[in-house]
Image (cartoon, grey):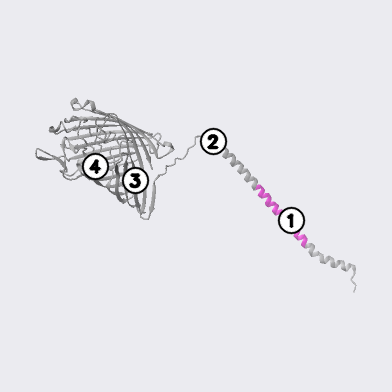
């Protein structure tokens, strides 16, 4: 059977028709996709251009800000120095080790307690020697253990042994405490109570060691500073209860010690003292401290009858009556502005003792690192052993052993040089003082020895 040529052409046409149609459909889809892709690319390019414009504007703003900042003094954030102590944490609490070094180079006119505080270059300096020079001081190594719970309960201890420059060994604090954080605390051991006569950078008369011992010596003026019952005694221990309520702080301290340790030679008004039982000082303190102002009121009283005394003509005489009162006021704006702020204080203290009254008033002002202070003291001695005028007092006594009224004047200054060798914990203090004593009766004063003066360079390094 023969197929005509026309029929063959028809068959080929109908066979190729679907393929052509499909090709047309694929081309149309591809063209549509290409157009969509071109639109997406155009949108991406537009976004990139916008982002580039924004980055350019931001860069220009940063350049302008940098130029403005470079023309202004830069404020470097104040970084608190890190405490350079060693810590050990355990399940039962934390143990810290710390310390500081105080080494002094001193020059002093001569030994003697014209201000009743140890203003001599050292306790062993010869009394009649003028222009004494000395190098002294100590290294303190402290250990503090403490344990705090989430509910505020706490307990801890502190021990601060001293290695003295002259080869001796001593002790600052050694106590145990427990209580509730920012609420109440009980402290037992060796420590100092609240300071009712702060002097601020008093480097020429302040030294670590005993606080309540050897404060009073016959024949020398006495600057009473409410320290007799403060604590840190070499002849006894203390217990203290303290409480904090908002801006109020209260403490009551009890010091039990050999009462004759208060007197440098265990003599009072020419009488040799006999200790019959331990003395008990009770010292309550109340402090109101709405910053930057602070005011404190306190008293201290030896409450044991016949703690110590003497025998006169075969009769026992109690000489242990001692009642003291104090007021301290402090204004401190340095905490907020250590460059232009100031710190000032006014302290007053009064002692009513057997046959003697003592009144002291002092104040200081601190600006930046410089301190200038003044202390006035008045002693009224009403009785003295008439049988021992000639040999009770040593050759360097300020007073000649006659009852009377005496005025003492002391002026002191100190300056702090910080960051030695760029070390935050290394400082040098420069200090100086001048003291004199005066009375209306010229015969009561040894005019060849009625003043004291001295200076000190202290190297202080904390670690």
Q: Is residue 42 magenta?
A: yes
Q: Position of residue 373 (x, y in %)?
A: 31, 32
Q: Is residue 206 magenta?
A: no
Name the residue that disc number 1 marks: 31
Q: Earlier in the sequence, mark 4 or mark 1?
A: 1
- In the image, which is nearer the foreground, mark 2 or mark 3? 3
Q: Is residue 462 left or right of residue 411?
A: right
Near mark 1 (Cα within 10 A), the count class, few <14, some 14-19 or many ≥20, is: few
Cα gap from disc 1 to disc 3, whole angstroms: 87 Å
- The quarter holding residue 65 reads top right
Cα gap from disc 2 to disc 3, whole angstroms: 50 Å
- The quarter holding residue 432 reads top left
Span shown in magenta: 22-46
- In the image, which is nearer the foreground, mark 1 or mark 2? 2
- The quarter holding residue 106 reads top left
Q: Position of residue 457 (x, y in %)?
A: 35, 33
- In the image, which is nearer the foreground, mark 1 or mark 3? 3
Rendered image: mark on residue 68: 2
Cα gap from disc 2 to disc 4, whole angstroms: 61 Å
Say whether residue 162 is visible: yes
Name the residue that disc number 4 marks: 229
Q: Earlier in the sequence, mark 1 or mark 2?
A: 1
Q: Is residue 281 left or right of residue 424?
A: left
- In the image, which is nearer the foreground, mark 2 or mark 4? 4
């Amino acid at each position: 059977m023969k197929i005509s040529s026309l029929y063959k052409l028809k068959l080929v046409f109908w066979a190729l028709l679907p393929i052509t149609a499909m090709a047309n459909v694929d081309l149309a889809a591809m063209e549509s996709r290409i157009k969509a892709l071109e639109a997406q690319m155009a949108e991406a390019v537009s976004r990139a251009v916008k982002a580039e414009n924004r980055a350019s504007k931001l860069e220009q703003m940063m350049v302008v800000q940098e130029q403005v900042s470079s023309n202004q003094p830069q404020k470097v954030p104040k970084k608190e120095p890190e405490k350079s102590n060693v810590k050990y944490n355990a399940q039962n609490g934390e143990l810290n080790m710390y310390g500081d070094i105080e080494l002094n180079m001193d020059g002093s006119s001569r030994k003697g307690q014209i201000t009743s505080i140890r203003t001599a270059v050292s306790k062993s300096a010869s009394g009649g020697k003028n222009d004494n020079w000395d190098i002294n001081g100590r290294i303190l190594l402290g250990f503090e253990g403490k344990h705090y719970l989430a509910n505020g309960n706490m307990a801890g201890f502190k021990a601060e042994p001293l290695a003295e420059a002259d080869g001796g060994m001593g002790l600052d604090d050694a106590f145990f405490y427990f209580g509730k954080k920012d609420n109440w605390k009980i402290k037992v051991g060796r420590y100092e109570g609240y300071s009712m006569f702060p002097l601020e950078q008093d480097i020429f008369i302040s030294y670590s060691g005993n606080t309540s011992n050897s404060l009073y010596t016959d024949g020398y003026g006495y600057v009473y500073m409410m320290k007799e019952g403060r604590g840190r005694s070499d002849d006894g221990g203390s217990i203290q209860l303290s409480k904090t309520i908002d801006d109020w702080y209260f403490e009551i301290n009890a010091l039990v010690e050999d009462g004759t340790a208060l007197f440098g030679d265990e003599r009072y008004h020419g009488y040799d003292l006999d200790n019959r039982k331990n003395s008990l000082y009770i010292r309550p303190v109340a402090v109101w401290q709405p910053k930057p102002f602070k005011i404190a009121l306190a008293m201290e009283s030896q409450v044991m009858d016949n703690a110590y005394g003497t025998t006169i003509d075969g009769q026992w005489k109690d000489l242990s009556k001692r009642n003291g009162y104090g007021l301290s006021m402090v204004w401190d704006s340095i905490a907020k502005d250590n460059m232009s702020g100031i710190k000032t204080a006014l302290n007053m203290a009064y002692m009513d003792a057997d046959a003697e009254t003592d009144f002291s008033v002092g104040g200081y002002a601190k600006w930046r690192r410089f301190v200038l202070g003044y202390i006035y003291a008045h002693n009224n001695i009403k009785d003295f052993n008439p049988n021992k005028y000639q040999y009770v007092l040593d050759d360097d006594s300020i007073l000649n052993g006659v009852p009377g009224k005496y005025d003492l004047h002391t002026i002191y200054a100190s300056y702090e040089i910080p960051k030695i060798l760029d070390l935050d914990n290394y400082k040098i203090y420069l200090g100086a003082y001048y003291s004199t004593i005066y009375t209306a009766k010229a015969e009561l004063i040894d005019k060849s020895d009625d003043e004291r003066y001295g200076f000190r360079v202290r190297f202080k390094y904390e670690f």
